[in-house]
Image: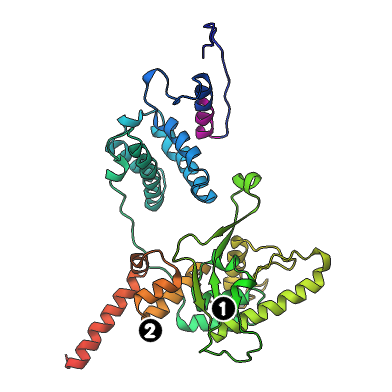
Amino acid sequence: MVDGNRKQVRRSVYGRTIADVQAKLIEIQGQAQGGSLPITRGREPTLAQFAARWLAGMEGHVRPRTLHRYRELLDLHILPTLGRTPLSKASVEHVNQLLATCHRAGLSARTCNYLRGTLRTLLREAERQGLVTRNVAALARPLPQERTETAILTPEQARWVLAAAERDPDGPLWVLGLTTGARLSEMLGLRWSDVDLLEGAVEYPAEAGCSMTIRQTLQETPKALRDKHGRWLVQAAKTERSHRRVPLSQLAVDALRRQRAQQREWQLAAGRRWEDLGLVFTDPLGEPLAATTVTHRWGRRLWRKGRDGQPDGPLYGLPPIKFHAATRHSVASFLLAAGVPMKTVSELLGHSQLATTADVYTHVAETLKREASDAISRVLGG
């Protein structure tokens, strides 16, 4: 860099990531040019330079975890390969080669396609600014992904879970998941003020309708973001469809009443140490629960063995199905198999589009088609 007296000034720039370094370089260039566009001597920006500007501009417009994921994918996979490429010189073949190389290096096809999606979003902004004439990432070929059938509980296994839930501290959370299909982050962010249990009603009055309203999610903040955002990220429901009222069955109402009684016992035991955040699901001190804690305890109860090798967990013997699949996916499959319309299931789950529900539960739809075909044959005597 040269000052007004043509004296060369050297500056050392440091950062934890490539994007951090590029952002600092751009800031220095901008200061030297009196705030003008940070592209010197008519040169167009490289992909890395534009990525730094893009990430800075996305701050506050996307969720912190989303921005963190963008930064990770760029720094770990995209910029080391394409970072020095002038923006307008990036080609479809560059993107195809990037995906192929990452896939050969061990990344799953799904992760590689996330790379393509991140690059496509970035280049969409470059296209909007007139820096590129076409979005080469959108034109690149996504890698084919093998569709694997999601493992879910059978109705009999679901009944085992409900029985075990009556004597497990995490039981109310299991029941709510198995009866509503809500996302784990939505249940962990649920507040008592969002739950209507119709106090005073001994039995579930179906016509009145006990319910819960999904308004927010709660997730543990990635460690790299905790200095800025704290340990917990509490955010409004992501889309209009995610913000929804969910009817509660008698099973769910009973489970939530057990949870409230359990919390009251914890509060008395904790005394002044109790953290009153108004959350439905907490630890014994009133603090939020981490999804990793819930899923770890769920897994341990599924196939844990004692020292003698005999079953030691309340659900020992169930296949190793993840919590998300055992609750959300199982609920959707049960409802579709029972003949509930796809649109109703989609609204209950809070999917942003009906196509999402149809895509995720294709295997269930195919089973229903076969059953429908068999029913026609029986009716016609075929």
Residue 381 is situated, as x and y percent measured from the top left of the image, at: 17, 93
Q: Quadrant of residue 78?
A: top left
Q: Quadrant of residue 302?
A: bottom right
State the mark number for residue 143.
Answer: none
For disc 1, the marked residue is: 175
* 186 on left or right of 105: right
Q: Give whichever of 214, 231 is nearer the camera.
A: 214
In the depicted view, which residue is nearer to us: 113 or 6?
A: 6
Residue visible at 37% across and 51% down? 109
Q: What residue type is labelled 2?
A: Ala
| Secondary structure type for disc 1 | helix
Relative to 379, residue 276 above or below: above
- Amino acid beneath label 1: Val
23 in the magenta segment: yes
Q: What element carries label 2?
A: loop
Magenta segment boundaries in residue numbering: 17-25
The crowd level at tag 2 (other Cα within 10 Å; few <14, some 14-19, many 20+) is: few
- Along the horizontal axis of the image, is 342 left or right of 307? left
Say which residue label 2 marks.
338
